[in-house]
Image (spheres, grey):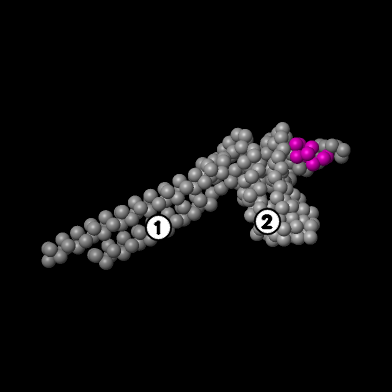
Amino acid sequence: IRKFHRKICEWSKTVMKHLLIILSFLLLSSPVIGQSERPETIIIPVGTMGKISDSQKQIIQNTLGQELTKYFRLVPQDKFEEAQEKAFEELEFEECTEDQCIMMIQEILQVENVFSLQIVEEKGDTQLSLTWVGLDEKKIATDYCKGCGTFELNTKIAILVNNLVNQIKSIKGLPTESSVTESKKEVVEESEKSLSSEKNWYANSEKKRVRFDSSLVGNH
């Protein structure tokens, strides 16, 4: 009985620990916790000039999307492409400037926010320019990188997104960096409390087992 009880307790402890680790990982990896009403945004495909490979361009596009999901809900790419085609059809050739097309796409999709990233490379030096377009304003954040590879560029993009978002906090429903950090901190604290409770449960269970075993010995 004692061996069986010990195995049950050890198994329960292991299962609880693994569940808490998995839960913490899933919640911490979530872009923003409790922000189901985040504003929507459109992401224009990354524009490049210079020696930027297609694979590098796609990695950078993925990073940009990942960083923006911390603050926005992203419009699916297929919806963006449909709206883009419709904008091309409705606008005359002379009217089809970049700004006019973006405004038309915003109107078609009924989305206020648009982000676009342009990367210009020349002789190993790279300029990154991230642009946000709202309904009646436009902001740009730029950075430079000398001899940077994909990893360094990804880091620069994360910084650019954070800097630009800090400039447009007036957007309704836009979470701040501190709220994202605070939410993740709460998850960690809650997980630690749960793990502590599980340890207390295990300790009490062990005490009960010892008492139970002692009573069996006394009866013999």
**Res 204 quadrant in image:** bottom left
Disc 2 residue type (three-letter): Leu
Vertical side of 94 occupied by 191: above or below: below
Q: Is residue 6 magenta?
A: no
Report how far apart the C-alphas of labels 2 and 1 lie in the structure: 37 Å
Residue 193 to residue 209: above or below: above
Circle 1 SS class: helix
Question: Is residue 101 within the magenta segment?
Answer: yes
SS assignment for the magenta stretch, majority:
helix
Residue positioned most to the left:
219
What residue is rendered at 51% in x and 51% in y?
A: 28
Q: Is residue 158 visible?
A: yes
x and y percentages locating residue 73 in the rendered image = 61, 43
Camera-side residue of 171 and 82:
171
Q: Magenta stretch?
A: 96-104
The answer to whether 88 is drawn above or below residue 10 in the figure is above
- Residue beneath label 1, please? 17
Give the image location of residue 71, x and y in percent.
Answer: 60, 43
Q: Which residue is mark 2?
A: 153
Question: Taking the image as drawn, is residue 74 in sight?
Answer: no
Residue at position x 26%, y 59% from top?
A: 206
Front-most of residues 69 and 216: 69
19 lies left or right of 81: left
Screen quadrant of the C terminus: bottom left
